Image: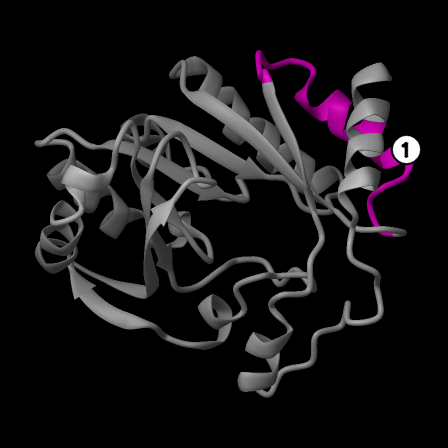
């Protein structure tokens, strides 16, 4: 079983609970103009077997205090079979597994094997909302821990209408963790290296003060 990996990052404290090793898988089913990891879209990545990647990750186990391994991307659910076999091998030790996903691809077995699903809600319409709802329905059925993240971009998804739509989408589910993230442009050099345009270059970065205001509005409505 082979998979394509863009990069592996050790020592993350923002991709799930505790200290984590993050595997960024290549490939994504979306083309968000604010994507922070464009290399996962336009580069094939490094080919790994499950055995090879498992061995590499297990070396970091002693350092993953109260943490574990997070599969990110890109979109891990595009390489579901590889992720399933990788998680099965890691669970023998055991290792806490989180998956960061856009929740547009429903694979019940992969959801069942994860401990936590970190769902990043993008700009969405009725069709995309239906996909996310189906994904959340199965997470709820399996009693999985779910965290929602949403990147706030001025003039794009920061309106009261958008915030209410997000809240309505999540209302049927017992989700206590909803985190708004600031839009940043640290990825600009990545686009330059890939010779790709970054279409949100003229949009201002989201300040921490504005993010607090958005969070307050969301919680009040």
Report x, y in % for residue 27: 43, 63
Above or below: residue 120 compared with residue 1: above
Q: Which residues are magenta?
A: 156-176
**Can residue 147 be found in the magenta stretch?**
no
Image quadrant of residue 43? bottom left
Report x, y in % for residue 11: 33, 47
Q: Residue at x 71, y 53 (%)?
A: 183
Q: Residue at x 59, y 16 (%)?
A: 176
Q: Is residue 52 left or right of residue 41?
A: left
- Farthest residue, direction bottom: 195
Q: Is residue 183 left or right of residue 12?
A: right
Quadrant that contains the N terminus: bottom left
Q: What number of labels is visible?
A: 1
Report x, y in % for residue 175: 58, 17
Image quadrant of residue 121? top right
How is the protein colored in the picture?
one colour
Quadrant that contains the C terminus: top right
Q: Which residue is mark 1?
A: 161
Q: Is residue 33 left or right of residue 203?
A: left
Above or below: residue 169 compared with residue 33: above
Report x, y in % for residue 148: 59, 31
Kind of element beneath mark 1: helix
Q: Is residue 112 left or right of residue 17?
A: left
**Can residue 174 be found in the magenta stretch?**
yes
Image quadrant of residue 52? bottom left
Q: Residue at x 27, y 72 (%)?
A: 46
């Amino acid at each position: 079983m082979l998979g394509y990996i863009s990069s592996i990052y050790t020592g993350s404290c923002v991709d799930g609970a505790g200290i984590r090793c993050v595997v960024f898988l290549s490939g994504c089913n979306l083309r968000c103009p604010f994507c922070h990891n464009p290399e996962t879209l336009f580069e094939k990545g490094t080919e790994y077997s499950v055995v090879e990647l498992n061995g590499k990750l297990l070396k970091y186990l002693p350092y993953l205090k109260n943490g574990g391994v997070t599969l990110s991307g890109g979109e891990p659910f595009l390489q579901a079979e590889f992720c399933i076999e990788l998680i099965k091998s890691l669970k023998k030790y055991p290792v806490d597994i989180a998956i960061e996903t856009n929740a547009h691809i429903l694979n019940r077995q992969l959801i069942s094997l994860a401990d936590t699903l970190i769902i990043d809600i993008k700009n969405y319409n009725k069709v995309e909302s239906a996909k996310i709802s189906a994904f959340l329905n199965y997470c709820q059925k399996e009693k999985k821990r779910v965290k929602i993240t949403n990147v706030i971009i001025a003039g794009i998804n920061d309106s009261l209408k958008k915030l209410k739509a997000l809240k309505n989408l999540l209302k049927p589910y017992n989700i206590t963790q909803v985190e708004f993230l600031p839009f940043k442009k640290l990825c600009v050099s990545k686009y330059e290296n890939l010779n790709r345009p970054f279409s949100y270059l003229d949009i201002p970065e989201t300040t921490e003060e504005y993010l607090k205001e958005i969070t307050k509005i969301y919680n009040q409505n």
